[in-house]
Image (cartoon, helix red, strand yellow):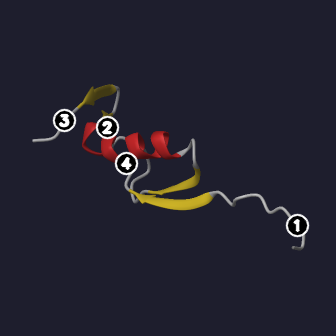
Amino acid sequence: MGGVTRMAERLRVGVIGAGIAGLTIVRSLQKIADVIVFEKSRGVGGRMATRRIDDVSFDHGAQ
């Protein structure tokens, strides 16, 4: 046949949400895919994020 060898293309994956679950799956998928994360907030962490009010910062968890 043609003799043309084609390299397998990497998967392209979108993950919605940069909380604990989203970031965990992103880390696992990076080995086999090009991953992009979509997050509505300014930072990552979801419900496990650090909140800052004036000079005070605190971590808060899911209810």
Q: Are marks 2 and 4 in contact (CB under 8 Å)?
A: no
- Mark 3 to mark 2: distance in Å? 8 Å
Q: Is residue 18 above or below residue 7?
A: above
Q: Quadrant of residue 54?
A: top left
Instruction: Give, as a three-letter code, the residue at label 2.
Output: Ala
In this view, the mark in front (4 or 3): 4
The furthest residue to the left: 63
Q: Residue at x 26, y 29 (%)?
A: 59
* Residue 61 found in image quarter: top left
Instruction: Judge the density around disc 3: few (<14), some (14-19), many (≥20) Cα neighbours within 10 Å.
Output: few
**Left or right: where 20 falls relative to 38:** left
The numbered mark at residue 61 is 3
Location of mark 2 (residue):
49
Where disc 4 sits, the SS reads: helix
| Residue 22, numbered label | 4
Q: Is residue 30 left or right of residue 38?
A: right
Residue named by callout 1: 4
